[in-house]
Image (cartoon, rainbow, N blue to C red):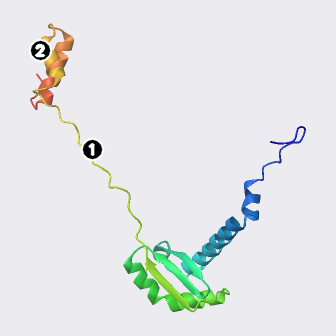
Amino acid sequence: MPHPGKKPPKPLPLARVFETDPRIAAWTARLKEEAALTTIVRSQLPRALAERVRVADVRETVLELAVAAGAVAATVRQRSPDLAAALRREGWHFTEIRIRVQVRGEAAPEQKTVARQMDTRSSSLFDLARTLPEGPLRAALDRWSRRARGRASG
């Protein structure tokens, strides 16, 4: 319970919390490092291929890349000497580049919506048309009923 007359401490801004908490600061630094490395790696690959590659982990002298498919992995493996050279030019010295295929789960396929077919035997509108007195509403429902059943309107 706070002392009477003493204001509670002001909450820290979120950015300050990120800077001062050691675990969050380490995570943020790692994220920035991986983003910088991903940018370098992607700059060395054709655009269509680059979009499917990201840095997954950095451990001392081992760089681990995650790719979206086996074919992408094979192409990146072929280019790994060029990637290592580009990274060295940028000040990163890796002795090994590992590539792992990390297939992302796809969203559930969209269900096709089947157009509801009018069943002429059970439609309450068809039943209603038969019970209405002669008039414009009954005539309109009769025309609609004939069209729904595939007959020409009269």
Query: CA–CA distance between discs 1 and 2?
Result: 31 Å
Closest to the observer: 46 or 42?
42
Identify which residue is drawn at 59% across, 83% down.
59
Disc 2, SS: helix
- Residue 144: image location, x then y, percent: 17, 24
The numbered dot on residue 113 is 1
* Residue type beneath disc 1: Thr
Residue 113 lies, with reference to residue 84, above or below; the image says above
* Res. 43 in view: no
Q: Tell me: 44 left or right of 2.
A: left
Closest to the observer: 1 or 101?
1
Identify which residue is drawn at 17% across, 21% down.
124
State which quarter of the image contains the N terminus. Answer: top right
- Label 2 CA crowd tier, 10 Å (few <14, some 14–19, many 20+): few
Q: Earlier in the sequence, mark 1 or mark 2?
A: 1
* Res. 90 in view: yes
- Residue 36: image location, x then y, percent: 63, 75
- Residue 9: image location, x then y, percent: 83, 48
Identify which residue is drawn at 49% across, 71% down.
51
Residue 72 in which image quadrant: bottom left
The numbered dot on residue 130 is 2
